[in-house]
Image (cartoon, rainbow, N blue to C red):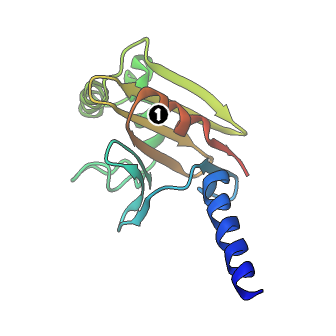
Amino acid sequence: MDKILKLAILCLSLFAITCFADTLALSARLKIEHPAPNLSIHTRSGLIVKYTDEKLFMHVIVEPKNVYPKIDLTGKAELYIRSIFDEEKRGKLSKELADLSKEQADQFGVTPNNVYRSKVGNSDAIAVYNSSDKKGQIFVFEEFTIHQIYTHGSKEDHDQFLHSIKER
């Protein structure tokens, strides 16, 4: 009887691992539903969720004082990050920040045709995928918080991460 119970628990455990997604609560209002990873690592500044060497995502909260050394983006972080994806918004920044925004857009591989915008409840999401580097960036703007999700993998992996962001 004891062996049957252990076997049943083992089978259910294996079934649960392969069939159910993990849920990462980003905030009181947002979550990411993703497949169970091979490894999750909490670093000093964020969370890395690794599936393979070629597929992972990393989540961090954007801290306005830490985006760039010696530049405090407090009160300007949202406009600055949005300007990376929107040249019109870039014009509302100081020359120094506009130049940084353009440089960051170039590093992310932003073009007029590869920026994706969506709503997740009351939050805005802006994403870009650079196919030559197999890297993507997703920014989610909540009322008081900006989430940055870095993706590494295929375009399909990036899109899967993007569409796994949902309301709680």
Indicate the secondary structure of the residue bearing disc 1: helix
Q: Residue at x 61, y 46 (%)?
A: 142
In percent of width and height, residue 91 lies at 38, 21
Q: Nearer the viewer, residue 60 or 100?
A: 60
Q: Nearer the viewer, residue 114 or 14?
A: 14
At x 66%, y 32%, the residue is 119
Q: Quadrant of the N terminus?
A: bottom right
| Residue 87 drawn at (x, y percent) | 39, 18
Give the quadrant of residue 55. top left
| Front-lying residue, 153 or 38 | 38
- Residue drawn at (41%, 55%) of the image: 63
Relative to 103, 84 lies left or right: right
The residue pinned by badge 1 equals 158
Q: Is residue 21 above or below residue 102?
A: below
Residue 80 appears in the picture as rendered = yes
Q: Residues within 10 Å of mark 1 (few under 14, many from 20)?
A: many
Q: Residue furthest top?
A: 113
